[in-house]
């Protein structure tokens, strides 16, 4: 099976007021269909930039980004959906209308949109909140709506940029379990950016560790273990130590201590 | 009604009644020249006398204001969205817009009257100019302040430029447009009245100017009260409309 | 840099277009830019209007008095309404309602009462400047953190001290903003008053030029008035920036 997402030798340079910044340097990556691939690394390592490239929102300087064999030049809502850290819900739309948004953009007729969105609300746990506005929803609920919005357009790939970053720890844990459930049921390909070691280990089939700026791929860990993961097992504890070992240096470097 | 609200209402009513009573008393006692300060009773009587012409004048003014208002809202929102959403335009044109906005428009009024003559045209043109700029500046600011994340999200879901404007930008600036409309009506009315006072042949401004020149104090007070009441009613109406349309904001 | 060039270009194109159109259509009526400079020179040399200086001074005096009155009444009313809850709740809505009325409706009554002299312009300028100042005081008081006041009182400060040393600095920024708006509006009020009918002052000169179709002189007078207005607002801006530094 050829890989669904292929990144070959991409780089990205930004011009800032204090001079050029190299966000990514010679990054290559491949993600197969049905994988849950987590990208983890210190702040400023370019993980969001990388995700932006996969989503067609950021253009690479050099190298190629291929999705389903095709080069990415612009957002492709038929293949890729994105979930951002700030839920980015439209405050003038109800939860249901927000979930429908992607379908609306694609010209799906009203009856069908409504049906698809309403059906999604069940697994999202939001059936009673369909007519509520974002300001009436908690942070966790808003993210669920955002994820629902991404699921509604039924793409093969879902990109998530620290979707649980703004939530408290307990909500994060619950959302992680819930996301795993959804992923296993829908068999989508997920690229998931996070800071959290726990999320990387509990959720992914593969973890990609990035270095501090300029971001490179430092290490790729395969996690073939079954779900749900026993996080206290010797194997997982060992993996956690390994993962932290890889990241710690980079985090320190990002903080400017080395 | 809570005790506090009761006290507040009482205070308001008592003050107004007391004010009117004192005013009436002072006028009757001859402490003020009735030529300049008419008694409230005289003002009430004057309502009847000027009733017809004042209402006709008010109607005329409101008609011109309505036309000027529609023009300034449409132009203000259209230009505001156009200039505000294209960064190049915004950067280059902002200082010009702000400069013209800050300039007292009355200074160009004589010129407008010289070009357009007396009557309805200058009133509508000037009223439009008066209302246009506050709305324009407000909408420009509103467009600039639209949450960037919403635009990114829409683009990520494949929104075309048209869809970005129609489904993201316009709904996002509705509160700003409503605020602008609330502001604009007072400015338009103000502009129209000014023109009527300066070079009018019709309308409330002209009526009030004539009454002032003729030293008809009770009639003038009555006319002033009439226009004020109309203006307050319009603004309250717009406020109610604003509330109805903003339910999602909380 | 490019932005500045573009702006200059736009300005140049605008002036050229104006020059062209004005000359082609009716130079007397539309006053091409080339006619403005000589008119300005004539004006500043006191040729076209020997009364220029006294007029400017009169207008400035009217503005000063109107503004001073607006500050006094605005601060007084603002604090009276803002510090006493019942009075505030009773009368603040009335002030708000009056603010919704286009100020110019009061002007004929003022003209009736005060005549065409400076007094009516001062009264009108006062009326216009009064509202933003009052509303700014009310807004400023409302945004003061009650916590700060409670802390001050807990330390035994007397009401007057709390007022002067805690409340005023906390609302300084809003207050100064309101004072600046008040000045701008007082200026507009005086000028509108003069243009709508007066015997002396800048507005009267403008009216005079307009009435005699001396359009070039009219434009020159407008330019001078604009300089005055921009100048006063610039001064107010400086004061505002000083206050900004202070309140932070």
Image (spheres, coloured by chain):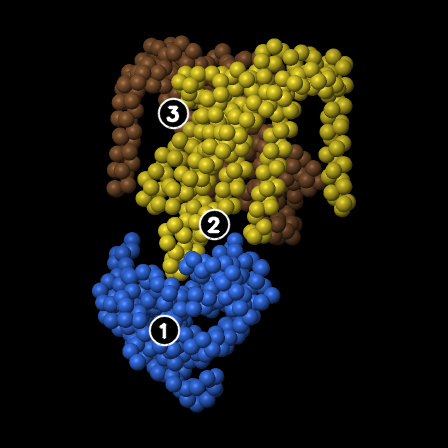
Chain colours: A blue, B yellow, C brown
Residue linked to disc 2 = B172
**Residue A254 in the image: above or below residue B168:** below
**Neighbour tally class for label 3: few under 14, some 14-19, many 20 plus, Cα within 10 Å:** few
Residue linked to disc 1 = A39
Q: Secondary structure at mark 3?
A: helix
Q: Percent x, y for residue C194?
A: 49, 17
Q: Which quadrant holds residue C164?
A: top right
Q: Secondary structure at mark 1?
A: strand
Please report contact status of discs 3 and 1: CB closer than 8 Å, yes or no.
no
Please name the residue shown 35% across and 16% down the image.
Answer: C29
Labels 3, 1: front one: 1
Q: Residue furthest left?
A: A62
3D distance between C-alphas at marks 2 and 1 = 33 Å
Q: How many marks?
A: 3
Q: Quadrant of the N terminus of chain A?
A: bottom left
**Residue A64 in the image: above or below residue B78:** below
Please name the residue shown 61% across and 52% down the image.
Answer: C147
Residue linked to disc 3 = C227
Let me know if residue A244 appears in the view.
no
Q: Quadrant of the C terminus of chain A?
A: bottom left
Q: Which quadrant holds residue B186?
A: top right
3D distance between C-alphas at marks 3 and 1 = 61 Å
Q: Percent x, y for residue A117?
A: 51, 65
3D distance between C-alphas at marks 2 and 3 = 38 Å
Please report contact status of discs 2 and 1: CB closer than 8 Å, yes or no.
no
Labels 2, 3: front one: 2
Please name the residue shown 27% across and 18% down the image.
Answer: C23
Q: Percent x, y for residue B68?
A: 49, 29
Let me know if residue A254 appears in the view.
yes
């Amino acid at each position: 099976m050829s890989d669904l997402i292929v990144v070959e030798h991409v780089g990205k340079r930004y011009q800032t007021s204090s001079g050029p910044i190299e966000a990514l340097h010679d990054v290559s990556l491949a993600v197969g269909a049905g994988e849950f691939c987590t990208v983890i690394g210190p702040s400023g390592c370019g993980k969001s930039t990388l995700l932006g490239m996969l989503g067609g929102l950021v253009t690479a300087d050099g190298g190629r980004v291929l999705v389903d064999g095709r080069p990415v030049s612009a957002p492709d809502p038929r293949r890729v959906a994105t979930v951002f850290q700030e839920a980015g819900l439209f405050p003038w739309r109800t939860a249901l209308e927000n979930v429908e948004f992607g379908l609306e953009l694609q010209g799906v007729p009203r009856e069908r949109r409504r049906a698809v969105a309403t059906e999604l609300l069940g697994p999202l746990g939001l059936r009673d909140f369909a007519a509520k506005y974002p300001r009436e929803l908690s942070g966790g609920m808003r993210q669920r709506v955002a994820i629902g919005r991404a699921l509604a357009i039924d793409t093969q790939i879902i990109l998530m940029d620290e979707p649980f970053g703004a939530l408290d720890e307990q909500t994060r844990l619950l959302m992680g379990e819930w996301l795993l459930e959804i992923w296993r049921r829908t068999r989508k390909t997920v690229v998931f950016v996070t800071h959290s070691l726990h999320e990387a280990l509990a959720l992914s089939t593969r973890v990609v560790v990035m270095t501090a700026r300029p971001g490179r791929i430092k290490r790729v860990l395969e996690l073939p273990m079954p779900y749900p993961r026993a996080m206290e097992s010797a194997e997982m504890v060992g993996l956690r130590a390994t993962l932290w070992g890889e990241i710690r240096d980079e985090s320190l470097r990002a903080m400017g201590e080395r | 009604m809570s005790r506090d609200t009761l006290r507040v209402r009482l205070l308001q009513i008592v003050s107004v009644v007391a004010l009117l009573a004192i005013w009436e008393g002072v006028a009757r006692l001859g402490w003020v020249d009735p030529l300049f300060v008419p008694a409230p009773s005289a003002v009430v009587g004057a309502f009847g006398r000027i009733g017809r012409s004042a209402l006709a004048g008010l109607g005329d003014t409101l008609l011109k204001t309505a036309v000027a208002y529609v023009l300034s809202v449409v132009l203000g929102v259209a230009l505001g969205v156009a200039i505000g959403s294209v960064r190049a335009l915004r950067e280059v044109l902002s200082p010009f817009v702000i400069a013209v906005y800050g300039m007292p428009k009355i200074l160009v009024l004589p010129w407008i009257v010289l070009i357009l003559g007396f009557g309805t045209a200058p009133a509508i043109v000037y009223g439009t100019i008066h209302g246009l700029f506050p709305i324009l500046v407000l909408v420009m600011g509103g467009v600039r302040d639209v949450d960037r994340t919403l635009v990114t999200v829409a683009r990520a879901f494949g929104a075309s430029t048209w869809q970005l404007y129609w489904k993201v930008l316009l709904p996002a600036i509705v509160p700003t447009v409503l605020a602008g409309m609330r502001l604009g009506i007072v400015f338009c009315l103000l502009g129209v009245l000014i023109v009527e006072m300066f070079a009018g042949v019709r309308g409330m401004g002209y009526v009030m100017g004539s009454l002032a020149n003729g030293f008809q104090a009770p009639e003038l007070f009555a006319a002033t009260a009439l226009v004020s009441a109309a203006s307050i009613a319009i603004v309250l109406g717009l406020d109610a409309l604003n509330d109805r349309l903003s339910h999602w904001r909380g | 840099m490019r932005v500045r060039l573009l702006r200059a270009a736009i300005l140049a194109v605008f002036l050229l277009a104006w020059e062209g159109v004005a000359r082609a259509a009716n130079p007397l009526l539309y006053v091409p830019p080339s006619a403005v400079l000589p008119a300005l020179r004539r004006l500043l040399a006191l040729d076209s209007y020997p009364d220029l200086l006294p007029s400017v001074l009169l207008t400035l005096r009217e503005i000063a008095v109107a503004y001073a009155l607006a500050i006094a009444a605005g601060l007084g009313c603002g604090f009276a309404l803002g510090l006493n809850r019942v009075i505030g709740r009773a009368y603040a809505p009335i002030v708000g309602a009056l603010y919704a009325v286009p100020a110019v409706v009061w002007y004929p009554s003022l003209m009736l009462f005060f005549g065409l002299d400076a007094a009516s312009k001062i009264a009108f300028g006062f009326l216009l400047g009064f509202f933003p100042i009052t509303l700014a005081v009310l807004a400023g008081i409302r945004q003061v953190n009650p916590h700060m006041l409670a802390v001050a009182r807990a330390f035994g400060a007397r009401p007057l001290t709390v007022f002067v040393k805690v409340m005023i600095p906390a609302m300084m920024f809003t207050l100064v903003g309101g004072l600046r708006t008040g000045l701008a509006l007082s200026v507009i009020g005086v000028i509108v008053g003069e243009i709508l009918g007066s015997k002396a002052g800048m507005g009267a000169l403008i009216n005079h030029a307009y009435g005699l179709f001396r359009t070039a002189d009219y434009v020159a007078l407008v330019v001078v008035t604009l300089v005055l207005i921009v100048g006063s607002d610039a001064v107010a801006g400086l004061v505002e920036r000083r206050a900004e530094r202070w309140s932070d």
